[in-house]
Amino acid sequence: MSALFDDKIHTTLADSKLQLAIYTATGRLIEKRRKAITPEGCPDYQELRTHANAVKRHTIDHLDYYLEEFARNVEAHGGKVVFCKDAQEVADFVLELAKERGAELIVKSKSMTTEEVDLNERLEHHHLESVETDLGEYLIQLAHERPYHIVAPALHKTREQVADLLTERLGVARETVIEKQTMIARAVLREKFLSADIGISGANFLVADSGAVVLVENEGNARLTTSAPKIHIAVAGIEKMIPRAQDLGVFLKLLGRSATGQPLTVYASFLSGPRRAGEIDGPDEFYVVLLDNGRTKVLADREKRESLYCIRCGACLNHCPVYRKIGGHSFPWVYSGPIGAILTPQFLGINHEPGLPFASSLCGACAEVCPVKIDIPKILLELRSEVKQADQRQGTGRLERMAFRVWAWVMRHPHIYELAGMAAASLAPTADGGGWVRSVSSAINPAPVRAWLSQRDLPPSPPKSFRQMWRER
Amino acid sequence: MSRDHVLHKVRTALGRSAGQPVEGPPPARLTVPEAGIEARIESFRARIEALAGKTHRAESMEDARSYVADVLLGRSAVASNAPILRQCGITRIAGVESGITDRVRLRELCSTAACGITGADYALADTGTLVMLASPQEGRMISLLPPTHIAIVERARLLTGLDELLSILPRPAEQTSSMVLITGPSRTADIEQILVRGVHGPGEIHVLVV
């Protein structure tokens, strides 16, 4: 584990206000989802998951076919498809288009994919104003932070912090009433929508048989982003594909319920191309940027390919006992929680943060709630094994390997095991009154073990071992 | 350029070759329950009202017109070009602008009007959803910019749910560049999970079933 990862975790754990904010928000989201998937609310919930998994598996296994079908259909409706291999190509495309059209102001609706490629920073570097319009995203953009959560980006901010932020960045009078804070943001952003030259959105789904981009949201900012400016650019990872519009019957029901406990979000937009002859409004130009940025690498790995089924509902974050303690900003990249723990090493390489696949109790809650049934714990285990193999190649982790070899040898020899047990019992610390041991003397606590023990209490050592009791029975 | 590059990488990763065909995806899973019109209307109204939307069952076109006039109370409104609005006489209510076909003018009116009045192509009973297809009759801004949205739905357009919509409209892109499903007023819970309505879209929604 890198010192930075360790440090961020401890900072989060030490902040009691933040702990409460994370715990409360994720707890509410858990409760909302639970109510939305009851047998009355969604009788076929498990069948929907199974079906969604089958559709995603089929689509991802034949992704080249659906990408081509999608591109043909977008173009048939007068839109353009731009394939980009990395972040730089996305920024270059947007910059070039903005330059050609003389655009100065861009409005953005929430998109993890554009976060992934740091699009705002890249555009601002070239003096293009790019404004996030989802309320939570707008707040974290004002704070120069990254999203704390896939669906609730400002989950960690309290109303007091929002009040300070709005006063500091917008120069408005301090306002701590959430309704009023929201209306301040609405007024600022309404102006932006009406004067923006380009709207950039993400995509929740790409629909191959329609050449359509599907966006779900509750605020209306994605609708404004995609229909007020004359140019709409949707930026999406290539894995967002589904074969048919009819598949939305399964995916929209799962996404809303898993993310926020809604049978359907307030808005779901199905957008296929620029406005057509006779349509009164809508964009004149429609572009879909299809991003690789490491996805084809994941695709090539049969064992872990299912990581690409993710529909970004955030349910695995809410239900993860680790996320709920260490929060979103402890994670080393834009994707946090269990899904972040499997995507980050695969996109950026396992050396980016070798501790990440180990920051899990493998309790399995993530797999249980995943609407497309990604087996996250299995993939975490695969990644752990890759980290260890890399250690071996680099000749590191020798001590650990030796320790486990000794352990294995001891376990194969019952008499030695018993002797070792007696030795450990005599050395083991005791706590007053036979309670749990909360600190361990340094004699049996060398450096590699110390980190492990620092987070754990030990039970008191029993007066007799199991083997002794067995013999005396 | 990158199109070929990316597609090539995808094919290599999957062990597929260019133009290799695909056996169809798993059959679409759409279930359309049996539900009579009365049950659909009741469910639709209950769902919208649970989301703090208002509904009204108009017994006649005149009833619809007078309900809308009561909601407006003389405030400014923009009406779409949906024929139903004209038939109900809603476009003749004082303060209601309609018949707009110019984008710039529509946007100007919508950004100052108190209410936007539209038809709806379909409505979904089990979620309380309006289905709006952009067309010469329906601009996108009318149901989006004004703080209040009033929609008139013909009862024959009330479907059981999303699955029925996708069964009768399997390829929406053949008809429109934009199909939007609207389920209740615009809302956010981005600050401390506290619900606030009307953040970007309309905070108030009235749906009339005629």
Image (cartoon, coloured by chain):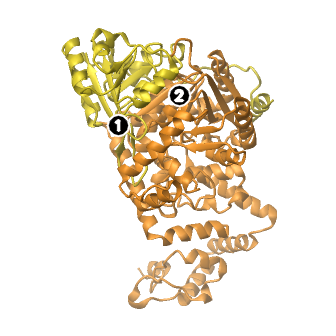
Q: Quadrant of residue A406?
A: bottom right
> Residue at (67%, 26%) from the top-left corner?
A67
Residue carrying label 2: A227
Chain bearing tag 1 is B
Q: Colour of chain B?
A: yellow
Residue at 63% over, 80% down:
A416
Residue A465 percent across, percent down from the top left: 48, 81
Residue nearest the observer in this picture, A458 or A228: A228
Name the side, left or right, on which A323 lies relative to A63: left
Identify whether A63 is placed above or below A450. Answer: above
| Left or right placement of residue B150 versus residue A443 in this view | left
Q: Which quadrant holds the N terminus of chain A?
A: bottom right
Under tag 1, what secondary structure?
loop
Say few, some or many: other residues with alpha carbon within 10 Å of mark 2 (under 14 / 14 to 19 / 20 or more): many
- Say which amino acid is labelled 2: Ser
User: What color is chain A drawn in?
Assistant: orange
Q: Nearer the viewer, residue B90 or A411?
A: B90
Query: With respect to residue A421, does B106 lie above or below?
Result: above
Which quadrant holds residue A412? bottom right
- Residue that numbered label 1 is attached to: B203
Marks 2 and 1 sit apart, C-alpha to C-alpha, by 19 Å
Examine the rendering and report whether any part of residue B72 can be seen.
Answer: yes
Please state which amino acid type lies under the numbered disc 1. Gly
Mark 1, Cα crowd under 10 Å, few <14 / some 14-19 / many 20+, is many
Q: Is residue A223 left or right of residue A293?
A: left
Residue A203 location in percent, x, y? 57, 34
- Which residue is painted at 43% across and 32% down in the image? A267
